[in-house]
Amino acid sequence: MFKRLFATALAFGMAATAPPAFAQNCAEREHVITKLQDSYAEELAFGGLQKSRGAQSVMEVWTSKETGSYTVLVTQANGISCIVAVGTDFFEAIPKIKVEGTPS
């Protein structure tokens, strides 16, 4: 009985302390930003606050007009940024021009 209890506790303890699978995509914000700027010529295009699980984080989209690449970054309050999406062929949407007057 003791061996089973010990093995179960050990297994759950190891699972609880294991890093999450997405941790490979996370680092200090300054390190991530430097990499985006130096390696991919990306600049901050837009961002905003995001509420998730009762906490707030900052969501940013970094883009490069030179290479067409983009990166979606989420930064937590502790300064750790995680890359949640990357891609190529970034484009800017052109807003529709409203013509003033009465439609015919």
Image: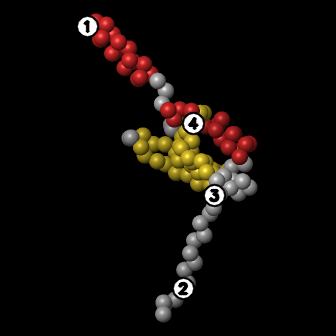
**Which amino acid is tagged 4?**
Asn
Inspect the image, locate mark 1, and give the three-letter code of the amino acid beneath it. Answer: Met
Q: Which mark is residue 25?
A: 4
Query: Secondary structure beneath disc 3?
Result: loop
Element on which disc 4 rests: helix
Three-letter code for the amino acid on which mark 2 is drawn: Glu
Q: Name the quadrant containing residue 11.
A: top left
Q: Where is residue 77 in the image (x, y as percent from the top left)?
A: 50, 37
For the residues labelled 2 and 3, say whether their Cβ atoms are less than 8 Å apart. no
Residue 78 is at least partly visible in this image: no
3 vs 1, front mark: 1
Crowding near the residue tagged with mark 2, few <14, some 14–19, many ≥20 C-alpha atoms within 10 Å: few
Sequence order check: which comes first, mark 3 or mark 1? 1
Label 1: few (<14), some or many (≥20) within 10 Å? few
Task: Looking at the picture, tell me which residue is in the foreground, 81 or 5.
Answer: 5
Mark 2 and mark 1 residues within 8 Å of each other at the beta carbon? no
Question: Alpha-carbon distance for marks 2 and 1?
Answer: 81 Å
Relative vertical location of residue 103 with respect to residue 84 in this rendering, above or below: below
User: Residue furthest toward the top?
Assistant: 2
Q: Which of marks 2 and 4 is in front?
A: 4
Q: What is the number of the mark on residue 100? A: 2
How many angstroms separate mark 3 from mark 4 (CA)? 21 Å
Q: Which residue is at a point 28% across and 6% down the rendered structure image?
A: 2
Mark 4 or mark 1, which is nearer to you? Answer: 1
How many marks do you count on the picture? Answer: 4
- To which residue does mark 1 refer? 1
- Marks 3 and 1 sit apart, C-alpha to C-alpha, by 59 Å
The mark that comes first in sequence, 2 or 3, is 3
Whether the residues at callouts 3 and 1 have beta carbons within 8 Å, the answer is no
Q: Residue 90 carries which label?
A: 3
